[in-house]
Amino acid sequence: MTKELDTRIEEAADLIRQAQTMVAFSGAGISTESGLADFRSPGGIWERYRTITYQEFLASEKARTEYWQMRRELIPGLLAARPNKAHLALAQLQQMKKLRAIITQNVDGLHQAAGSDQVIELHGTNRTVSCLSCGQRWSIEEIQTRLEADEAVPDCIDCGGIIKPDTVSFGQSMPEEAMSTAFQWAQDCDLMLMIGSSLAVQPAALVPVAAAEAGAKLIFINRTETPYDDLAAVRFNESAGELLTNLVEKIIGPG
């Protein structure tokens, strides 16, 4: 570790020690160390399938067939993924009562798997699937079993309605309660830890902005630049897992 990096880690650790109410905001970059590619990574599944909007999904059997073909390929990686050092460090900060809650753009459920509670999933979850007509819900594992049995477009076994993962698709409204709570937590915190987001997807990207405008200090941990880097009191481009582990060790101290 360079002296310059160690200095920034100590600055961030001091901010965490002094904070009364810290909230974390995470994006896809926090899960890449768990083997889950973010939406903008070159190559891979997201470049081989087109985006299907919510409206097209509802209107077209052909679009649903294409959508579920992609999901059949995507789900095994999701099920195999495990929380990495970054998820575990945030869970540890919660256990230490240093972190109030996590607001995430992710749909992978890895924060909860790491042991975190008080998690708001702004874009829903890939872990469950629901019928859009009657509301019946299944685990993603149950639906994957049907897909692997060559059921091209699984439907509701109760009412025959259209089923869909409990994620927010392009063209679908954001969950009002989750968004409202996220912005309230952002405005109430005095420190926000932003990890692994390009802050390019609106309106979720405005959550850290709302924290800054309410007077909170921000720590950014992201591999690439974001449009809001000037808001950060301390900024890192290093691996989130190693960095957060080092931060927790600094806060705990020797012994």
Image (tube, rainbow, N blue to C red):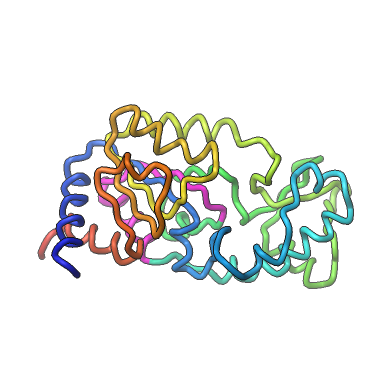
> Which residue shows up at 66% across the image and 64% down it?
47
Q: Residue at x 81, y 40 (%)?
A: 133
In the rendered image, residue 29, in percent from the top left (x then y), is placed at 46, 59
Estimate the x, y position of residue 151 in percent, counting from the top left. 85, 66
Instruction: Give the number of marks.
Output: 0
On the image, the x and y values in percent for residue 202 come to: 54, 39
Q: Residue 80: say if magenta.
A: no
Residue 79 vs residue 236: left or right? right
Relative side of 2 to 21, left or right = left
> 97 or 48, which lies in front?
48
Q: Residue 233 sits in which quadrant? A: top left
Q: Residue at x 60, y 51 (%)?
A: 125
Q: Is residue 157 left or right of residue 26?
A: right
Residue 123 x %, y %: 58, 45
Towards the viewer: 118 or 251: 251
Quadrant of the image containing the C terminus: bottom left
Q: Nearer the viewer, residue 159 or 32?
A: 32
Q: Which residues are magenta?
A: 85-107
